[in-house]
Image: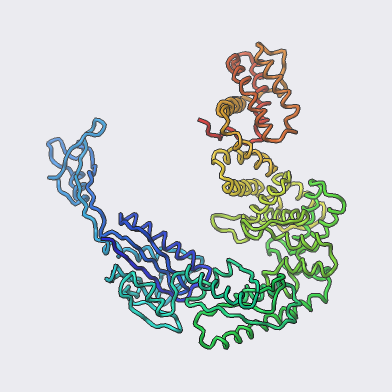
């Protein structure tokens, strides 16, 4: 018989951002539990609202299948003594298997006799298996956890009810003092406690009690209601997927409505208005047919249409103080100059063990200047970059950013333009934060991209220098994201910068500036390099590269991140060539032999050659060396591979570790010249070509 089973965990209202990942997690854990318990099912439906996580499992088998297995025990010589009596080992083994020594059989395994017991395990009824679900539920993890009452259990929110229905029968279990039954809770204000007759009645029973449990259907209804409103007024809406998801997880019975605010607030910068509505009130912003922001918004109520006018007025009243505050801050912030805001940064701490924000900006300016020089910026570009580096954190001391922290950088750009800064300088003030998430948008201007790299490099060098290195999942200063951002920026721009070798150069420049540091800027430099290599591996994960290619190119002394990325691309593009396997084997043989000896001279003496193959390899190597540094890495790899037939002939005719020390030294020097060229690709020994 195919069964349906309903599991519902009722809790106090959860934060919107954890609802979706939590129901996915419960789904995965329950599915794994059933699989581990050998219980078949056809489908699991997810249901989630702010107050519940529920699964409806279809096609559930009646019971576990029986198992017949032959269980191996100790060897016969251990199971019986010399007189043929059963030893404690044999008796203990059979007792552990629920059998007796009378049921023992001997079977030969690889020439040795062992004790075996034929074991029949009857499958448990599915209802019995489902009673193990409390352990699955309580093992869930969340970004924040709560305890309640006198209990030690930690969960996202206190558990208030449990539903456990196999078809129409309750499968009883308890979590703390809550016992599972068939009673669920309807809408907090419109509904009431209600019994569910059968598992398959779940969705309709809740719908009758003003709860749309299916989050997909709830979201579709919200979109439909909003679309009806905007179509009626010929409005355009800023459909924000994240906001829609959040709103969907705040309500159980959605009713969309439109509200308004005074047109005078449209004089505020758009980001301020949008932040006030979206981030603070969860309102959707509206535009006219030309894309101009309108003095209207759409929100979603958790309830029906009764007294909706009061709800609209209430939401409008709540928004006004936010907009009034924003208008006040905007007006007040324009009464000071950028230089005055920058001066205030001397009293703003970047970190109490590192420096003030003003000192961080000074270090970043040094890094930015060095980067600009290496990228051959024009004098004007360098001047713009230095201006941006001098002011880029100034908006942190404005009243607007003090109230709306999420506008840092954004308000910096707006104010910089108001105060007469050049467009690229103003844009860099905003873009230096980018990317703001692992896969977020990258800076669009050259000045902004360089400033973003410089600021992130200083943060990484500073925290590592102060001994605050990320470990495990602990990364309170988001250094992993910042390092990954650097990798993405240089990869996007194809900027060949020796970033991993610049720490010492930067430290020397800082020292020459007479800046006083509380920490050693060069401390943990090796760990910084390893840290960046890990971020490169993260980058390569998105490129679907084989793990051995990643291992090869990241095992390198190369300081240029783009070179490492290009090396990986070159190997990946050529790995399917017919000769690739033989070519790499020849090159890795060179590398391994070159590592075995240290020649007294790196120069190759043709006068010591004993056969034509040595001269042939020497000439081919010289020709490649003369142009190798200028070749694109894909071509460089192709040219290195072209040496493979000559290398193979060379090995066939020569003993590298010759008895004559001079000849041996000469041949090792020859191999090391080739090995050094391969190092631009990392360690080719890591490649799997078998």
Q: Quadrant of residue 421?
A: bottom right
Q: Report whether residue 663 is seen.
A: yes
- For image coordinates 13% across by 37% down, the residue present is 84
In the figure, is residue 82 to the left or right of 687? left
Q: Is residue 624 above or below residue 681?
A: above
Please tell me which residue lies in front, 414 or 265: 265
Most extreme residue toward the right, as rendered? 379
In the figure, is residue 87 to the left or right of 254? left
In the figure, is residue 434 to the left or right of 418? left
Task: Tell me the quarter of the image containing the N terminus.
Answer: bottom left
Q: Position of residue 685 (x, y in %)?
A: 57, 32
- For image coordinates 87% across by 54% down, the residue present is 380
Q: Quadrant of residue 682?
A: top right
Q: Position of residue 195 (x, y in %)?
A: 33, 78
How many dots with numbers? 0
Please tell me which residue lies in front, 19 or 153: 19
Q: Position of residue 499 (x, y in %)?
A: 71, 46
- For image coordinates 73% across by 65% down, the residue present is 409
Please tell me which residue lies in front, 129 or 570: 570
Q: Position of residue 254 (x, y in %)?
A: 51, 77
Q: Report whether residue 596 is seen.
A: no
Q: Quadrant of residue 667?
A: top right
Colour setup of the view: rainbow
């Amino acid at each position: 018989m195919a069964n349906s089973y309903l599991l519902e965990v009722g809790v106090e209202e959860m934060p919107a951002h954890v609802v979706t990942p939590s129901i996915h997690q419960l789904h995965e854990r329950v599915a794994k539990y059933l699989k581990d318990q050998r219980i078949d099912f056809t489908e699991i439906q997810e249901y989630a609202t702010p107050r519940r996580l529920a699964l409806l499992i279809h096609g559930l088998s009646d019971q576990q299948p029986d198992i017949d297995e032959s269980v191996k025990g100790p060897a016969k010589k251990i199971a019986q003594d010399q007189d043929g009596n059963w030893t404690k080992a044999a008796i203990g083994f059979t007792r552990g298997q629920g059998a007796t020594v009378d049921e023992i059989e001997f079977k030969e395994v690889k020439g040795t006799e062992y004790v075996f017991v034929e074991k029949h395990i009857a499958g448990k009824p599915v209802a019995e298996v489902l009673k193990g679900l409390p352990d699955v539920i309580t093992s869930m993890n969340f970004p924040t956890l709560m305890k309640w009452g006198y209990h030690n259990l930690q969960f996202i929110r206190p558990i208030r009810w449990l539903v456990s229905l196999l078809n129409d029968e309750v499968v009883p279990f308890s979590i703390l003092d809550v016992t599972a039954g068939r009673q669920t809770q309807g809408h907090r204000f419109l509904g009431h406690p209600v019994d569910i007759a059968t598992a398959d009645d779940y969705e309709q029973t809740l719908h009758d009690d003003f709860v749309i449990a299916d989050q997909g259907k709830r979201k579709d209804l919200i979109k439909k209601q909003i679309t009806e409103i905007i179509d009626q007024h010929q409005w355009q809406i800023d459909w924000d997927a994240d906001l829609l998801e959040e709103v969907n997880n705040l309500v159980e019975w959605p009713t969309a409505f439109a509200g308004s605010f005074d047109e005078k607030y449209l004089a505020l910068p758009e980001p301020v208005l949008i932040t006030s509505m979206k981030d603070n009130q969860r309102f959707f912003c509206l535009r006219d047919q030309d894309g101009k922001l309108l003095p209207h918004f759409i929100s979603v109520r958790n309830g029906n249409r009764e007294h909706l006018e009061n709800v609209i007025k209430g939401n409008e009243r709540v928004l006004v103080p936010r907009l009034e505050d924003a208008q006040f801050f905007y007006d007040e912030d324009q009464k000071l100059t950028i230089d005055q805001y920058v001066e205030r940064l001397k009293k703003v701490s970047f970190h109490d063990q590192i420096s003030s924000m003003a000192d961080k900006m000074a270090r970043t300016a040094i890094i930015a200047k060095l980067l600009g020089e290496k990228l051959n910026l024009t004098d004007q570009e360098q001047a713009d970059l230095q201006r941006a580096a001098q002011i880029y954190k100034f908006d942190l001391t404005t009243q607007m950013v003090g109230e709306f922290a999420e506008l840092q950088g954004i308000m910096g750009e707006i104010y910089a333009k108001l105060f007469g800064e050049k467009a690229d300088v103003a844009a860099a003030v905003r873009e230096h934060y980018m990317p703001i998430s692992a896969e977020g948008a990258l800076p669009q201007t050259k000045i902004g991209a360089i400033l973003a790299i410089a600021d992130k490099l200083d943060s990484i060098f500073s925290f590592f220098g102060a001994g605050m290195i990320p470990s495990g999942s602990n990364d309170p200063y988001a250094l992993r994201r910042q390092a990954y951002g650097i990798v993405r920026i240089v990869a996007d721009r194809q900027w060949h910068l020796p970033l991993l070798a610049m720490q010492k150069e930067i430290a020397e420049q800082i020292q020459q500036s007479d800046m006083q540091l509380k920490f050693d800027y060069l401390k943990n430099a090796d760990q910084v390099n390893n840290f960046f290599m890990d971020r490169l591996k993260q980058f390569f994960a998105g490129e679907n590269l084989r793990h051995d290619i990643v291992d090869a190119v990241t095992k390198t002394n190369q300081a240029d991140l783009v070179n490492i990325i290009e090396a990986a691309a070159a190997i990946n593009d050529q790995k399917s060539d017919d000769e690739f396997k033989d070519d790499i084997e020849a090159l890795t043989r060179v590398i391994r032999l070159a590592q075995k000896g240290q020649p007294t001279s790196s120069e190759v003496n043709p006068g010591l050659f004993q056969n034509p193959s040595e001269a042939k390899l020497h000439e081919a190597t010289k020709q490649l060396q003369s142009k190798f540094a200028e070749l694109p890495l894909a071509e460089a790899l192709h040219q290195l591979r072209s040496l493979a037939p000559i290398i193979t002939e060379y090995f066939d005719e020569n003993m590298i570790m010759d008895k004559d020390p001079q000849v041996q030294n000469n041949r090792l020097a020859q191999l090391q010249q080739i090995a050094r060229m391969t190092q631009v690709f990392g360690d080719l020994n890591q490649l799997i070509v078998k």
